[in-house]
Image (cartoon, rainbow, N blue to C red):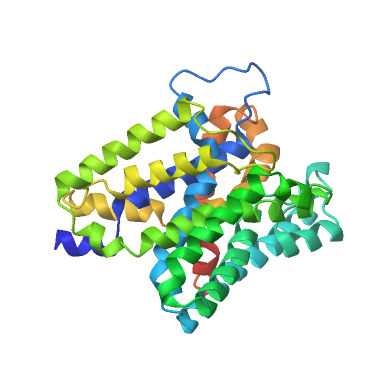
């Protein structure tokens, strides 16, 4: 029973997904430069991990979908595009409508048709929130790799994926990616400039995903050793500047890639299948809304910062504020999931 559960559901990855979701919220609602540039005691790990959440998400997304891509599953691919596009467009429209309604109360919520247009196009505006660039890039990379697996013969897939990896890194390290996109406005540069830096994570996920079933069969001691090695590697790559950072946009370079791969390894191989069923159920329930929190945290957080925090005596952009935004957004997703609508799951999960 435990082995079958492990094959269907990896509790380590669920924990990692939940943690990285929390880190994304802290990226946007915990600013170290607002008062004193000091990390509160005991929070140095949270501060250090904020940069690696999105790479982990991208790697995991393609890891879980690897076999479907390789089988050229057309029905699944159409379903995947629906699951990507619906929350991308819906949250843009919801945020725009609610912010426009709140704009008479605060300039923070002022939204223009230009903002909505760019948000619907590439998911990146300062008025509505820039976090949806990830979804825009995920849609672009899904289309790219769907075409890749249709055009490349199975025996050439491994070489082809490594070639994609190499081209993406060359574009980063030569500065060509920066040159291609730095002249565009923020709303275009921010998402499109990150397509090539995200490709290596997708490639690793697609390559590793083919071994998913085999890895689930490894003995617990072997998996524990791999998890420990991943944790040590993550610690090493975070603390040591082994790789040169290329000129370009955020998330580029081999350091972030190495840390994300190490974190994924550390959590994926954790032999947690023998934990009690209630623990599995609790982690599954808590991580269920990870993507919903990612989509909605700026929507919820800005409202909380402007209308709730002043009455709580809570300063915005502090560590405590970031934690409160995460909890409020998770509760918002939980309550929204109770709405009896078949589209709700697409928006929250």
Residue found 51% across the figure and 27% down from its top = 241
Q: Position of residue 154 (x, y in %)?
A: 42, 76
- Image side of residue 139 versus residue 286, left or right: right
Please name the residue shown 60% across and 27% down the image. Answer: 318
- Which of the image's four quarters has the N terminus? bottom left
**Looking at this view, is 116 or 190 the one in front?**
190
Nearest to the observer: residue 322 or residue 170: 170
- The residue lying toward the viewer, choosing from 259 and 50, is 259
Provide residue 334's location: percent of width, then percent of height: 47, 56
Residue 183 in view, yes or no: yes
Q: Is residue 289 visible?
A: no
Q: Quadrant of residue 120?
A: bottom right
Q: Is residue 333 left or right of residue 316?
A: left
Q: How many marks?
A: 0
- In the depicted structure, whether residue 295 falls above or below residue 8: above
> Where residue 201 sits: x, y (%)?
50, 53
Query: Does residue 45 appear left or right of residue 223 in this picture?
Result: right
* Quadrant of res 306: top right
Residue at image position (69%, 38%) is: 247
Q: Nearer the viewer, residue 200 or 220?
A: 200
Q: Residue furthest bottom?
A: 75
Up the image or down, 298 lies above or below 281; here it is above
Q: Residue at x 51, y 19 (%)?
A: 40
On the image, the x and y values in percent for residue 214 come to: 24, 62
């Amino acid at each position: 029973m435990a082995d079958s559960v492990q094959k269907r559901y990896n509790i380590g990855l669920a924990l990692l997904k939940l943690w990285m979701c929390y880190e994304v919220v802290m990226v946007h609602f915990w600013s170290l430069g607002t008062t004193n540039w000091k990390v509160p005691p005991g929070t140095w790990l949270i501060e250090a991990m904020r940069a690696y959440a999105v790479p982990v998400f991208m790697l995991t997304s393609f890891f879980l979908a690897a076999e479907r891509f390789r089988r050229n599953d057309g029905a699944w691919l159409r379903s995947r595009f629906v699951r990507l596009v619906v929350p991308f467009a819906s949250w843009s429209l919801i945020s725009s409508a609610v912010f426009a309604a709140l704009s008479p109360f605060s300039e923070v919520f002022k939204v223009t048709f230009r903002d909505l247009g760019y948000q619907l196009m590439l998911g990146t505006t300062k008025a509505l929130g820039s976090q949806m660039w990830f979804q825009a890039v995920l849609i672009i990379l899904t289309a790219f790799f769907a075409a890749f697996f249709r055009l490349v013969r199975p025996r050439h897939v491994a070489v082809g994926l490594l070639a994609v990896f190499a081209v993406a890194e060359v574009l980063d390290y030569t500065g060509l990616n920066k040159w291609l996109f730095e002249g565009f406005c923020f709303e275009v540069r921010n998402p499109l400039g990150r397509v090539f830096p995200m490709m290596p994570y997708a490639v690793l996920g697609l390559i590793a995903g083919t071994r998913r079933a085999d890895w689930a069969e490894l003995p617990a001691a072997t998996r524990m050793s791999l998890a420990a090695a991943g944790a040590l590697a993550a610690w090493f790559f975070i603390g040591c500047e082994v790789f040169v950072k290329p000129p370009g946009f955020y998330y580029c370079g081999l350091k972030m890639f190495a840390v994300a791969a190490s974190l994924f390894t550390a959590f994926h191989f954790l032999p947690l299948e023998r934990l009690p069923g209630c623990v599995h159920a609790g982690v599954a329930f808590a991580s269920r809304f990870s993507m919903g929190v990612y989509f909605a945290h700026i929507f919820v957080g800005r409202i909380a910062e402007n209308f709730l925090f002043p009455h709580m005596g809570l300063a915005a952009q502090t560590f405590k504020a970031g934690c409160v935004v995460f909890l409020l957004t998770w509760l918002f997703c939980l309550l929204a999931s109770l709405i009896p609508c078949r589209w709700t799951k697409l928006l929250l999960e």
